[in-house]
Amino acid sequence: MSIPSFATVICAAGSSDRFNQGQSEHYKKEFLSIDGHSMLYRALSPFFSLGPALKAVAISINEGLEQKTLYALEDLGIQSDVPIILVKGGSTRQASVRNALEDLDKSGISFDFVMIHDGDRPYVTAGLVAQTLAMASLAGAAAPALGVVDALKTIDENGFIEDHRSRAGLFRIQTPQAFGFKDILKAHRLASEENAAYLDDTQIYQQFIGKVATVQGLSLNRKITFAEDLQ
């Protein structure tokens, strides 16, 4: 089976406020170095392992951080002919993804699928990228999923356990998430007309297009939200 053509959207326009809680200096977490490479580099580089199937990259960023973003990409911008588009981030992640999809659509570059990934998930693997894209090529959309292993409770306003919930059938959804490009673009446009907030792109796709298949996620592929997540 041949690898379908695709573009990658990297979401890196967040404020990093939770990451910087309790710290004297404010860091843009995607620019931090992990074992010699920036977090942003690590989040993006596995997508290049699929070779010529990758047609374009769009990175949502904060205004004024264009040069620092290019620096954090290290040699990714010159090791291939894949164009990298820097996209102005929106007020929410949903808006940032929509901006990236629109810029890709305007670019005139041809591809069939798009993979949307968090810039603060630096431990994604090439294998997970390939598996997710392969499933999307069969089902139309796909995302990695991990079963919930902790006991689930609801807690009242005073901090006491209130109720006990079953974890049966509950999963944590990761990125990268892969979609037929025209379908997820259409879904985002419809979502913006509703002025509604959605949890992630799989919910937007399911609301307006159809079902999303899953592949086995990786516990290693964690999202770096707080500084201790790097430990």
Image (cartoon, rainbow, N blue to C red):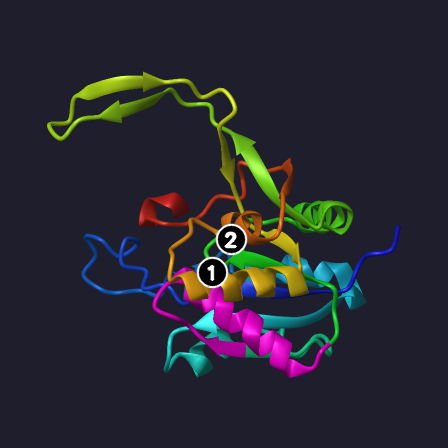
Image height of 95 relative to 136, above or below: below
Which residue position is annotated with label 1?
191
Residue drawn 38% across the image and 20% down it = 151
Q: Give the range drawn in magenta.
A: 86-109
Dot 1 alpha-carbon crowd within 10 angstroms: few under 14, some 14 to 19, many 20 or more: some
Q: Which amino acid does label 2 sit on?
A: Ile
Up/down of 46 relative to 164, above or below: below
Residue 78 versus residue 115 in the image, above or below: below
Q: Can residue 99 be seen in this view?
A: yes
* Tag of residue 204: 2
Q: Taking 227 as reference, is 55 left or right?
A: right
Q: How crowded is mark 2: few (under 14 residues within 10 Å), some or many (20 or more)?
A: many
Front position in the image: 34 or 66: 66
Q: What element carries label 1?
A: helix
Instruction: Please name whichever residue, 156 or 43, is drawn nearer the observer in this view of the structure.
Output: 156
Q: Position of residue 121 (x, y in %)?
A: 50, 52
Q: How far apart are marks 1 and 2 (CA)?
A: 7 Å
Q: Is residue 72 magenta?
A: no
Is residue 190 left or right of 19 when viewed as pictured?
Answer: right
Where does residue 201 sit, x and y in percent of width and height?
A: 52, 53
Viewer-closest of 6 and 21:
6
Q: Which mark, residue 17?
A: none
Asked whether residue 38 is in view, the answer is no
At 16% from the left and 21% from the top, the residue drawn is 160
Q: What element carries label 2?
A: helix
Residue at coordinates 13% horizontally, 30% vertically from top-left?
157
Looking at this rendering, what residue extends furthest in the right direction?
Answer: 1
- Residues at circles 1 and 2 in contact by the CB criterion of under 8 Å: yes
Residue 84: x and y, percent?
61, 77
